[in-house]
Amino acid sequence: MPYPQPLSALLTALPRRFSLCVTGATLAALMLPHMAHATSCAELAYQALPDATFTTVEVVEAGKWQPPQNQLSRIMSAPGMNVAGHATQAPNPTFCRVAITLHPSADSQIRTEVWLPLKGWNGKLLGVGNFGWAGSLMYYGMATGVGEGYAVASTDTGHDSSTPEGQGGRFTLGHPEKLIDYAYRADHLMTITAKALIEAFYKKPASHAYWIGCSLGGLEGLIEAKRYPEDYDGIVAGAPPNPIVNFNAEQLWAGWMSYHNPALRVSRDKFRLLNTAAMNACASPVGKKQGFLDEPDKCTFTPDQLLCKGNDTSSCLTANEVKAAKNIYQGPVNPQTHEVIFPGPAKGSEDGFSADGKAFPVALDLFKYAAFQNPNWDWTTLKWDTDIEEATRKVGPLLHVDDNLTPFFQHGGRLLMYIGWNDGHNPEQLAGYYQSLQHNAGPEYQNDVKLITIPGMGHCYGGAGCDTFSKLGAIDNWVSNKQAPETIVASRVSNGKVVRTRPLCAWPKVARYDGHGNMDDASSFTCITPESQSK
């Protein structure tokens, strides 16, 4: 780009905030070795990025970053969501903040930020995954990452959830390019943009790149591994809803079932009764004390054991309530093939069950907007064979990830998946996917993927279990030091203080109490392989 005056003089005259549109470059220009080197934060705005508008380039001083306060920030500020496993969020160090809007298509507006530590960069990149339907940047994860010495990047995936049209899945209605951005293009472009800015700023490329995300962020990680196996060296994918059509179908199942047969509606009190009975039947002494099932997949309790012998009372389940509970555990079934579309939640998670004849909004949006492109679609008419198949045809090619990630492993990639036993997503389903990944990877690469199942943890965080651990430390140690995460010590945090620790074990191993030590101390547990993987 020609300048009429020396660059140093031009930069001196620039305000701290400005906009600059860069056009005419090709995608390949991002990775060219002769890309200009920036000598200051402000000079980054003069990099030749394709289809990009620089909106903010500024130095953020130590302790000055204040993330927006909204529902997402309340979730992301929870200790269990902290990517480094910190009990509290530390103040930020000084960093260079680069905010860019990427527009690879005429209908694309992908807000992206890259944060670059001004001191103490550890030579690595962290990409932070999204949550829900996305639409926001993941500032808490970015702040933690930059505090750990990483250059960090995040994107809203191409829509703004603070606007009415950007809430939930509405943005996909009539916008196929935005759906592509959401599915995979935004994350990939964010990644190569971040790598280009890193090389320009630090005058050397990142030595390693990691992705960390849970829920949608976990699925994004799998999509990155499948579509762009060289983008990341290590990926942490928490509770990835994959295949997402099947998973969202399961989320609609209990509401659909109880809508069509009101006799199958179950009160919250009866689900609590069910949970108490499962705990009494299957929890270990540790689990009973701390409030969760240790090994739900070994629990042989069934709802039939609570069947009322006479009249309905608060201490038993009616025949219809038993039937509803068993249907929820099983998950929806294809009426033609009689195969389970996606398994229901695990034993011990009954406190989170709902059978009130209503739809689960996040899941509903996938069918209504992304798959069927019909805001008036009536979810109560859902056909469990043809509609699931049609939705899979529509969005599966964009959002589903098969069980062959061998190119990612061949590149040297490492994949750590984790999930809570009290998540609505049954960890047994993810364990099946994990085994398929290992099988397809073959003996040479089967140890490059690990799965952690976490007793008592809810969806990505929370619950009665130990939900706080360093995903960042685990993946970096694996990639950088070749030490696979066989055991990770996790914490339960209350009011900013660690009140309990417990080891998390690489599946199929489980943490067993030694019988005499402090139940709240990880040193009292050992990871062992259970006698059987069947119920």
Image (cartoon, rainbow, N blue to C red):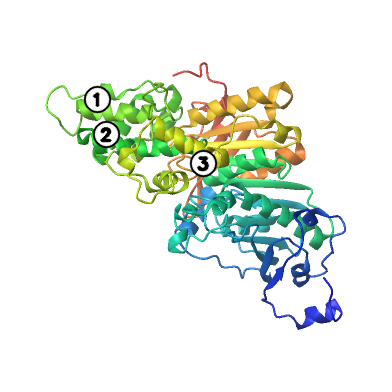
* The C terminus lies in quadrant: top left
* CA–CA distance in space, label 2 to label 3: 39 Å
Q: Disc 3 marks which residue? A: 395
* CA–CA distance in space, label 1 to label 3: 41 Å
Please provide percent x and percent y for residue 26: 76, 57
Please report the residue visible at 29 percent of the width from the left and 44 percent of the height from the top.
Answer: 358
Q: Is residue 199 left or right of residue 311?
A: right
Q: Earlier in the sequence, mark 2 or mark 3?
A: 2
Please provide percent x and percent y for residue 312: 14, 30
Q: Earlier in the sequence, mark 1 or mark 2?
A: 2
Q: Is residue 158 left or right of residue 374?
A: right
| Amino acid, disc 1 | Leu
Q: Nearer the viewer, mark 2 or mark 3?
A: 3
Mark 3 residue element: helix
Mark 2 residue element: helix
Q: Which numbered dot is residue 273? A: 2
**Is residue 345 at all visible to an observer of this figure?**
no
Mark 2: few, some, or many residues within 10 Å (few <14, many ≥20)? Answer: some
Please provide percent x and percent y for residue 333: 38, 26
**Is residue 246 at all visible to an observer of this figure?**
yes
**Residue lying farthest top?**
531
Q: Disc 1 marks which residue? A: 306
Between 44 and 93, the residue placed more toward the observer is 44
> In this rendering, is residue 207 above or below 5?
above
Whether pointer 1 and pointer 2 mark residues with C-beta atoms closer than 8 Å, the reply is yes
